Amino acid sequence: MAQTKSKKIPLTGDQAVATAMKQIDPDVVAAYPITPQTEIVMYFSNYVANGQVSTELIPVESEHSAMSACVGASAAGARTMTATSANGLALMWEIVYIAASLRLPIVMPVVNRALSGPINIHCDHSDTMGARDSGWLQIYCESGQEVYENTILAVRIAEHKDILLPVMVCQDGFITSHAVEGIQLLDDKKVKEFVGEYKPAHSLLDVEHPVTYGPLDLQDYYFEHKRQQSEAMKGALKILPELFNEFEKTFGSKYDFIDTYKLEDADIAIIALSSTAGTSRGVIDELRAQGIKAGLLRPRVFRPFPREKILDALKNIKAVAVLDRAESFSAEGGPLYTEIKAALYDSNIKPLAVNYIYGLGGRDIFPDDIESVFSDLSGILKNNKVSNPINYLGSRE
Amino acid sequence: MSMVEVAWHGRGGQGAKTASQFLGEAALDIGKYIQAFPEYGPERAGAPMKAYTRISDDPIYVHSSVKNPDVVIVIDPTLLGAVDVVEGLKDGGVLLVNTEKSPDDIRRKVGLKKGKVGTVDATKIALETLKIPMPNMPMLGAFLKVNNIVSIDEVSEIVKAKFLKKLGEEKTKANIEGIKRAYNELKIG
């Protein structure tokens, strides 16, 4: 059925994020304005130049400096954002950890692209999967609409007084970042009200309440500070549902830690992040029409890892394929697979589990590929055995 | 579910990406669900490139490139022979080529035995209407002739809305004229 009225506007995923940033109107955006940066910062700098936002835009000389400037600005009490991708994120590395350890609520949209080498600019999740242990929350988005709305939601998550951790909002490079789709924009005023005025809890500039950021912290207290970070991340699991609810009440869109499709009564399922989940939906419809009970689980929040939600979603699944768009070179499969398996270990849920590493460097993933995975799963279920736990989907042998 | 998938073939700088988006935007404006995206390689002016448009009455979830297009549009005829433009074309699909040659000639050249072939000299139309060799909008007109998911009137309205401010009245009219001429002059065989 066609939409009754056309309120959507055509935007790429990058434009959608830049629009979200315009509506958020952060105090400071520090970014490295050329490759490997994305168009997000290009569009946003237009808003700055046109006076459509009051943001102080700091164009820096490298991504390392971009995150360093963000750390300074955020510690000073400014609502701070940046955006990055691929090798840009890799160059930020040192400061990415520092931002999290200083509990700075920086929001960073990340366009997922491959890390060099060999040199490649296309989609995979190597960049943010590498940063999965940096102490940032990570949200993986399937579509332009989702990345737009979650950029706005991320501000509230990061700044929540009992979280105070930075957030990466991830989308698939080129696949959604450069694809035009119809995006339903949220009302400017409502977004402004939703994000609210930022009142930093511990500002360096608040001389009445002096604080220290980033001092030497050796054997005496470093461990306790890391422990606090860990507790904050665990605590986010309890707080996020409140914010999901508030977002839904305000804007109508329902988000959760995970998203599922026809999973409830499924025998076999695929677990995949971001846009690949979308490609799987049509395949599931076709298989269902043939009487095959196929389903999908899409983790949206990867950090913190929503163990309970995932286990509950998998409770009736007999065989599951975990699709990883990143290789961790552990010789034990991709990062999503190992975490899913770890979550299953101390539960009563024991589906047969198999891993597919796919789509590295932008190798396209077609419905046929997804179908072949489901076909493998049917075989695994029939034989009640996984012969090859780690597979490479779409790679030449 | 009815979905139309279009593959555009051009060379960097010829407006294939723009045309793919324009078709999508026109369809979005009348309430369809759309996707429009280019296939990015090492971009440079003159290099062969592809772009895609998906239009559907239902939400579009698939995010892979278009493997089996309903319509293939070749903006630059020098790509024929260099690129297998009809690879994956659906059985009842349509190949549209910007060329002064006849549909029969093109069918022989690409070795296509199925579907339909449409030809129109879009570069000539662009030169006569817009005064520049930019055949992308006329090729959009050719598409409208063979697929009615969006009507030529709806597209003309969008062109007006989009271009009037940016390009002025004269160029807007020339664009619409280019679309209409290609729509009328398309030869199908």
Image: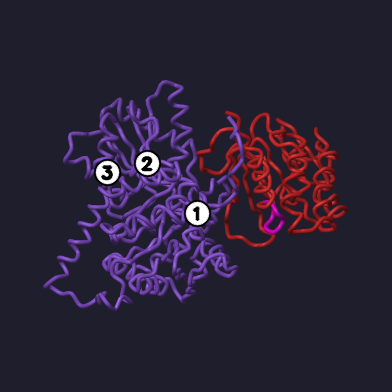
Chain colours: A purple, B red
Which numbered disc, 2 or 1, marks the residue that appears first in the sequence?
1
Give residue A77's position: percent from left, percent from top. 35, 70
Picture residue at 80% right of the left edge, 41% below the top: B119
In the rendered view, does A324 fall on the left or right side of B96? left
Question: For the residue carrying disc 2, how many other residues have a C-alpha within 10 Å: few (<14), some (14-19), or many (20+)?
Answer: many
Of tags 3 and 1, the one toward the viewer is 1
Q: Which residue is mark 1?
A: A189
Q: Which residue is mark 2?
A: A298
Q: Secondary structure at mark 3?
A: helix
Location of residue A184 by image quarter: top right
Queried whether the magenta region covers residue B141, the answer comes back as no
Same chain letter for marks 2 and 1:
yes
- Amino acid bearing label 1: Lys
Task: Say if mark 2 contacts mark 1, CB within 8 Å.
Answer: no
Location of residue B111 by image quarter: top right
Give residue B66's position: percent from left, percent from top. 58, 41
- Amino acid bearing label 3: Ile
Q: Which residue is mark 3?
A: A340
Picture residue at 60% right of the left edge, 35% below the top: B56
In the rendered view, does A6 fall on the left or right side of B124? left
Task: Say if mark 3 contacts mark 1, CB within 8 Å.
Answer: no
In front of the other: A8 or B185: A8
Q: Secondary structure at mark 2?
A: strand
Chief SS of the magenta region: loop
Chain under disc 1: A
* Magenta residues, start to end: B11-16
